[in-house]
Image (cartoon, coloured by chain):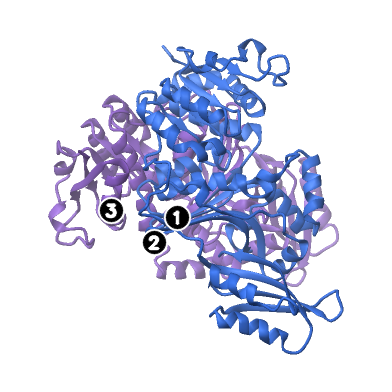
Chain colours: A purple, B blue
Amino acid sequence: MAKVITLGFLGCGNIGGGVYHLLTDMHGEILKRENIDIRIKSALVKSIAEARSDVPKDIMTEHADEVLKDPDIDIICEFMGGEQPAASFMQQALENGKTVVTANKMALALNWHRLQAAAVGHHAGLYYEASVGGVIPVIRSLTVSLNADEIDQVMGIVNGTTNYILTQMSQQGRSYTDVLAEAQQLGLAEPNPTADVEGYDAAYKLSILSSIAFHTRVTYAKIHREGITGITPDDIAYGREMGYTLKLLAIGKRSGNSIEVRVHPTFLPNEHPLARVDGSLNAIYIHGKYCQDMMLQGRGAGDKPTASAICGDILYAACHMDTPTVPSFDNTAETDPAISFTDNWNCRYFVRLDAADTPGVLGSVASAFSARSISIASLLQRPSKEKGRAQIILITHEANEQAVQETISSLNAELVDVKSMIRVEC
Amino acid sequence: MAKVITLGFLGCGNIGGGVYHLLTDMHGEILKRENIDIRIKSALVKSIAEARSDVPKDIMTEHADEVLKDPDIDIICEFMGGEQPAASFMQQALENGKTVVTANKMALALNWHRLQAAAVGHHAGLYYEASVGGVIPVIRSLTVSLNADEIDQVMGIVNGTTNYILTQMSQQGRSYTDVLAEAQQLGLAEPNPTADVEGYDAAYKLSILSSIAFHTRVTYAKIHREGITGITPDDIAYGREMGYTLKLLAIGKRSGNSIEVRVHPTFLPNEHPLARVDGSLNAIYIHGKYCQDMMLQGRGAGDKPTASAICGDILYAACHMDTPTVPSFDNTAETDPAISFTDNWNCRYFVRLDAADTPGVLGSVASAFSARSISIASLLQRPSKEKGRAQIILITHEANEQAVQETISSLNAELVDVKSMIRVEC
């Protein structure tokens, strides 16, 4: 006799529809593989009349309690997006002893402590593979496969929209606003693109990724966040000339009890495996004491890849109803006081200056950097379009964030206009 | 109170030593993460006196039964390598109800049916993440994360030795024998390199990979296998000129109930993600109905990365002693009769010919291909070093293996000398 597992959906748009179709398509195969008969009993929607999904309307309901409190339902799959009411619905489901599967990075990153406490307290499972990197199995790889290792670095392209925009800007030399408008027309960027282009989405994902990689709670508030709206084709072109590719990266590093977590545009050497991850692909680079370097890449969005990851979670949950999995690190609302978070990291820096083309300017720029012990690795000077001005582009050796910021502030604004400062990882 | 889990090792060389050191180094951290106190009680070695590992001699034994039959031991970790006695020791361990963790692709590929039957019959676990791709979490990704998906393709660089040799040949234009000798000096190739360079190692790994990807037993005997010993710098150079990179690939494809499994040198377009995986790195490209395209890359060998994967398995096993995992597909000794295995696949072909430089030869070559409906996608003709001869290099559009083999046999040997035929994937 097959084990019957009954699902309830919270939300039934693009992702919910994708999961419905996968489970319908693969029902017989899943029965054969795991002897589990997965049934979808109900799906919460705002309005049945206005539901655009082709999921049968007879399983839809407009009443959350019909899903959350239904004693038949074993696993709640949350596809609502946004923090609320998704987070409180998930918490209620867990408190009712139901296992939760979600792809909602925002609700999870901001409410992890509540959700985890509810899961542990009620012996329920909490699974979220699709919340970071879409179908890329990075959550399970970190929490299970690398669980005996000591991870010191995660670095990811975790937002497909910004990677698409930067790739187009890079390949076609077009402006940010131009490519954004096109991405919006193609449905690759939201009408309000803030969450993607300002790095909020990547920061929620980094909160999750670094928490599990470093086995300690990394709250969203600890993350330094910058978006891509200030990036110009000039930055990308000069970077390329110097051998670098621009990506919006979510970076987490741990050294002893010190952690740095930051989302910002980043130049990578062209040979870095992440530099070659183009378009809407996602990828996560991992480094650890034992595993050394590793990279996982795949589709970060789309209904089918996301459904694959979610249904992998559903099937694992269904096979392990009696031994549910929840994250095992300390789950307090705040970060562990033993851990320090630094905004004053070391990395390399790309700095682009527009300077007066007069004798001594290059010398004064060089002096400003050397005065703070910042060593310049490569430098490029070009005539500016504007007469009497020059473009100076330099890349430093490894330097301290605060020292670089101070150097930039110290430059005489009349002589030197700082056009951009972009961090460089390698 | 922490749960005590006791390990016994079978073999204690490079890998066993790596696992010992990781577990010693990470003991406190693992206790903190999972509340599990992992202890290593004994390690079987051939000769304690001659053991070169720096593992303490007081846990070493020369008697297999002291490990296999010790009632204190929960998990047996097999690091012996080779088919026997590793396979029969693992079977005995499983029959004694002990969970087994192994990295031994040969013993697993050839004895899977026996090992799986013993594991299921005695409620023991069987874990083998490190058997394919070293630290790359491809086994767990396929068996868990992608368990609800329908995988139609796995394509992997799963042998670091041959990837190192081909990378050096490609980057430096050196001959196979020259690079092999250097790799042997550097310890990157065995004194007897047959298992690597003839593709046996890759074929064992493909047997495991395609069995779990396609949810059916793919025995080693079904795999078409060719090594890299016949590859010349000329092949690599002409391929590069046409935009391709040469790799030894393990390829598994499934379409309906038809499966093709093959290990052979393969040209990939330079843009393919696997084309950029150089040196001793491993990588596995996966394609499925829902997940679409995905790639996982990392260290395929080395004591630390291998130890990371093995200890991930050990820790998962330790956390799930009551619900052990074993592969869920049919585990008979032979392949499922409903599945057909084909040696007559379709792909593209690179063919290099040394031909008499006389009028009509190119026409007769072209005719031989078109007579079997094989369409030529690109062609390059060059004067040969030998007077009166020409090099003709062509790449076909997708064509049938048998038709290509027949075409090659049909060419007039006096006029046309077939130097190489290399398959092309994209």
- What mark, if any, has residue A196 been given in the picture? 1
**Amino acid type of disc 1?**
Asp
- Callout in the foreground (3, 2): 3
Q: Residues within 10 Å of mark 3 (few under 14, many from 20)?
A: many
Left or right of B383: which side holds B155? Answer: left
Instruction: Say above or below: A168 vs B127.
Output: below
For the point 26% across and 33% down, the residue is: A94
Give the letter of the chain under mark 1: A
Left or right of B71: which side holds A406? Answer: right
Q: Earlier in the sequence, mark 2 or mark 1?
A: 2
- Callout in the foreground (3, 1): 3
Mark 2 to mark 1 CA distance (whole Å):
8 Å
Q: Position of residue B366 (x, y in %)?
A: 64, 83
Q: Is A102 or B208 nearer to us in this picture? A: B208
Q: Residues within 10 Å of mark 2 (few under 14, many from 20)?
A: some
For the point 67% across and 85% down, the residue is: B364
Quarter of the image for residue A301 reads bottom left
Question: Badge 3 is on which residue?
Answer: A16
Instruction: Say above or below: A330 vs B369.
Output: above
Mark 3 to mark 1 CA distance (whole Å):
21 Å
Instruction: Say above or below: A290 vs B358.
Output: above
- What mark, if any, has residue A190 been given in the picture? 2
Mark 3 to mark 2 CA distance (whole Å):
19 Å
**Amino acid type of disc 3?**
Gly
Q: Position of residue A225 (x, y in %)?
A: 52, 46
Q: Earlier in the sequence, mark 3 or mark 1?
A: 3
Q: Position of residue A319 (x, y in %)?
A: 31, 36
Give the letter of the chain under mark 3: A
Q: Is A212 or B396 nearer to us in this picture? A: B396
Q: In the structure shown, which secondary structural element does the residue marked by tag 1 occupy?
A: helix
Q: Is residue A415 visible?
A: no
Q: Position of residue B316 (x, y in %)?
A: 45, 29
